Image: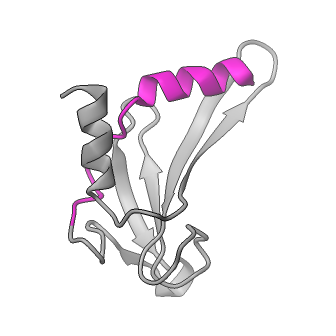
Amino acid sequence: MSADDAVLDLRATWPPLRFQENLKLVIVEQGPPTLMRAALKIPAGRNQADNFWRDDNILGGIDIDTGMIFRAIQRGGPREVEADTHPDTGAAIKGLTLPGWDAAKALCLKAA
């Protein structure tokens, strides 16, 4: 699959025209920067933005080596539920590999 095809496939996973972000936690101590954690905030329901505190939105944990979403949850805290598929589209979230992950990770580490 080409990078363009992967991006189109990703767009089909959840509804368009919504803002979402990929968060990366980079630690810089002595030595080179290290990527420690990554997450994808995914809007759902009537939400136009990906703020996780809003009902329906999803937080996906990203494997920092592969870029694959290994777990996705909605709500958080005592109301937390697993969200293996997007509630609006039915498309799989868990197991989805983000296109261009290696390039995005390299850019993040370079910027740190």
Q: Identify the residue at image location x=42%, y=69%.
A: 73
Q: Identify the residue at image location x=18%, y=28%.
A: 1
Start and end of the magenta stretch?
A: 91-112
Rendering quarter of residue 102: top left
Residue 106 located within the stretch drawn in magenta: yes
Q: Identify the residue at image location x=65%, y=22%.
A: 109
Is 1 situated left or right of 73 in this image?
Answer: left
Coordinates of residue 80 in the picture (x, y in percent): 46, 80
Residue at the extreme front: 17
Coordinates of residue 2 in the picture (x, y in percent): 23, 26
Answer yes or no: is residue 96 visible. no
Answer yes or no: is residue 80 visible. yes
Q: Identify the residue at image location x=28%, y=58%.
A: 13
State the colouring used for the structure image.
one colour
Residue at the extreme right: 30
Residue 79 or residue 3, whichever sits in front: 3
Is 110 situated left or right of 17 in this image?
Answer: right
Where does the C terminus fall, quadrant-wise? top right
Coordinates of residue 27 in the picture (x, y in percent): 73, 31
Coordinates of residue 81 in the picture (x, y in percent): 39, 79
Residue 1 against residue 90 in the figure, above or below: above
